[in-house]
Structures are given as C-alpha cells and as structure tokens.
Amino acid sequence: MNSTWKNLIFPVYLPTFLLAFGSGILIPILPLFARSFGMSFSAISFVIAGSSIGTVLGDVPAGMILERINRRTGMLIGVGLITVSMIGVGLAHTGIELILYRIVSGVGLALWNISRHTYITDVITNQTRGRALAIFGGINRVGTFASPAIGGILGAAFGLRLPMFVSAALAGVVVILVLWFMKEEHAETHEVVQHEAWPRIKRLFIEHFRVLSTAGSAQIFAQMIRQGRRLLIPLYGATVIGLDVDAIGFIVTTSAAVDMMLFPVAGYVMDRFGRKYVSVPSFMLMGLGMGLIPFSTTFTGLMLATVVIGFGNGLGSGCMMTLGADLAPSDGTGQFLGLWRFIGDMGGVGGPLAVGNFADLFGLETSAFTLAGIGALASLTLLLLVPETLRKNA
C-alpha cells in the first residue's frame, strides 16, 4: 500500500467508520423517538430531514470556508458541531428542539463532508478515484452494518435516549483521531478575500450550469431515495406491520450487510469500465425494492424488500461522490464540491419530507411508490443525460 492510501486510513477512513456507526445506531431509533413526542408523520419527517436541512444551509458556505482554512480545521469544526448537537438531541424534550439540534448536526456534517471529499479529491487520481471513494462509501456501509441492530437493542433495553449519547461519544472519538493523525498537505494555495467569494461561486455555477443541472438532477433524485428510506422503513415496519424497535433494527442491519459487501465490486467496475456501469443499475434496483414495500405484510416480506434496496445501494457505493470529484475543476475544487453537495442535499431534505407528507395525506404505501419512481428517475437521468466521466486514457 503506497503512502497516498496510507494517508487516508486514519484521517478519513477510520473517522468515517465511527461516524457511520454512530449514525446507523439512530436509524431505527430516531423516527420512533420523535414519534414518542406525539408528532405526526410530517413533523417526524422534519426531524429526519433536519440534518439534511442543515447540510443544505451549510454546503456552499462550507465550500467558501475551505478556501480560507485547511482541510484539517474544517473537519474538526464539522465533527465538533456533530458531537455537541447529538448531545442536544439526547437531552431534548420537545419536537422543536429535536429539529433544531438536527439542523446544527447537518451544518457540521456539511463542513465535515466537504473537507474530507476535497481532501480525497486532492490526493487521489481520476483512474483510482472510483476505488478510493467506493472504499469510502463501503466504510460508511460497514459502519451501518451492525449499528442499527445495536441501536434497537440499546433502545429496547435502556430507552430511546441512550443511543443518542453513544452516537455523540463516537463523534467525540473522531475529533481525537483527526487531531492526532490528520496532516494538512493540500490546502488551497490561492488567496481569496471575502468579497470575492460569492462572485467566484456565481462564476462556477454559470460555467458548470449544464453539468450541475443534469448530473445535479440525478444527484437530487439519488439522495431523495437514499434518505427517504431511512424514514420509510422504520415507520412502515412499526405502524403498518407492527414490528418492535429491535426487529426493525435487525431488518435494517440485514439490508446493510448486503449493502456493504458490494463496495469492492462498485469500485472495480467504476475504475475499469466507467461510473455509469454502477450508478444506473444501482438506483433502478433501489426503486424496485421501494416498490416492493407496499406488498410487504410480514417481517420476512419487509426484510426481502430492504435487501433489494441494500443490494442496489451497495452497487452504487461512492458513485455520486466519484461523479462530483470527476466533474470538479482544479481551480475552486472546494467551492464546486460545496455546490455539488448543496444540490444533492436538497434531495436529502426532499426524500424524508416527501415520505412524511405523502404518508399523512395518502398513507405510507403511497410514499413507497413515490420513492420507487424517484429511483427510476435517478437511473434514467444518469443513463440518458450524464456523460461518462472516467478518463481511461488520461
């Protein structure tokens, strides 16, 4: 293993695993915790979407901030906000508090995500980027493999608040890892005064409008189905089938097990054949799995549907991050990736909100069919409108 890959293990990959593990603990817990406050499906969807709302608010400013500070500082500020906000979620007593703390968490996540995404883009070439970011996505999946079941067990045994504090503690460990292992070697070298930042963002948007509108649309649809499933599956299992929290945690963990096994395949195919060879079938399969959920009336039925979703998501491990890194210009990488994640995170907001509002109006079954259609839209947009970005002969 060369020094470039070694530079990713402790500063990026291990912290990613710990944060993913902490986030996975909350998958079966957070919707039910919000429900314990007597909130409607629509209100619960705001709790789940709160993190994505925060990332939408923070993405572009985070990209601008990275023009003025180094990657290490950006990571530290981001994960520090995540730690504090998760403690707040665990101490919350009203739905409004939950939403506000989740938004703060999302702002921290924006800075953390763009800092590490930019760092990887700096140190990895186009020809190995698919594998690097597939590993990155795979580590996220490994982190969420066992954690939903653990979250369900902790919630059932000790109450729904304890998992929030466990998640906060894991984020605190990440702060220590970044302080200890991260060495800043790839900060932006050009100086940017504050009044020039917004004109540069505007210029990047105009120059890359076509790709941001086409690939960006696919990014929106992709994040809608990915984030929407985090609300739909626990609520459908609890309210339609009548499953308890540990059973839901087991279902989510099983799906994650299938998901995490595919990231080596995803990385190899992206770098050998092209990015679209994984992204197009990935979201089509996720849509198919969503379409199976309304026909699920038992634990086993919901398990099978979520396994299909997990297979599709695993096949697309790292694909949208790779696409964004491929498209990013060398001048203003952080700002472009801020725009890229801003567009995707709008989908991350829209997915849970669509699930919650359609559930209140028409039922959770309609929400599932809506996400199925969104998955098909993501797949078709990538197939028909987005060019292949692997440079095989570069």
Image (cartoon, helix red, strand yellow):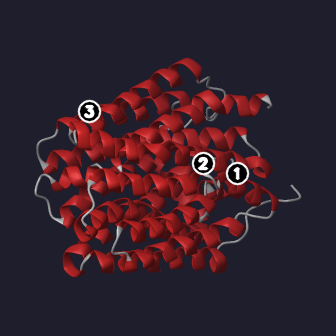
What is the number of the mark on residue 213? none
- Does the residue at mark 1 contact the one at mark 3 (Cβ under 8 Å)? no
Lower position in the chain sequence, tag 1 or tag 3: 3
Label 1 sits on what residue type? Pro
Q: Quadrant of residue 2?
A: top right
What is the number of the mark on residue 87? 3
Q: Residues within 10 Å of mark 2 (few under 14, many from 20)?
A: many
Q: Secondary structure at mark 2?
A: helix
Quadrant in the picture for the C terminus: bottom right
Q: Which residue is mark 2?
A: 138
Looking at the image, which is closer to me, 141 or 347?
Answer: 141
Number of disc labels: 3
What is the number of the mark on residue 264? 1
The correct choice, above or below, for 175 with respect to 257 in the image is: above
From mark 1 to mark 3, how far is it between C-alphas? 35 Å
Q: Is residue 69 left or right of residue 153?
A: right
- Does the residue at mark 2 contact the one at mark 1 (Cβ under 8 Å)? yes
> Which of pointers 3 and 2 indicates the residue nearer the eye?
2
The residue at the point 17 percent across, 56 percent down is 35
Q: Position of residue 36 (x, y in %)?
A: 14, 52
The residue at the point 52 percent across, 78 percent down is 377
The correct choice, above or below, for 106 with respect to 189 in the image is: below
The correct choice, above or below, for 237 with respect to 371 in the image is: above
Looking at the image, which is closer to me, 241 or 107?
Answer: 241
From mark 3 to mark 2, how far is it between C-alphas? 27 Å
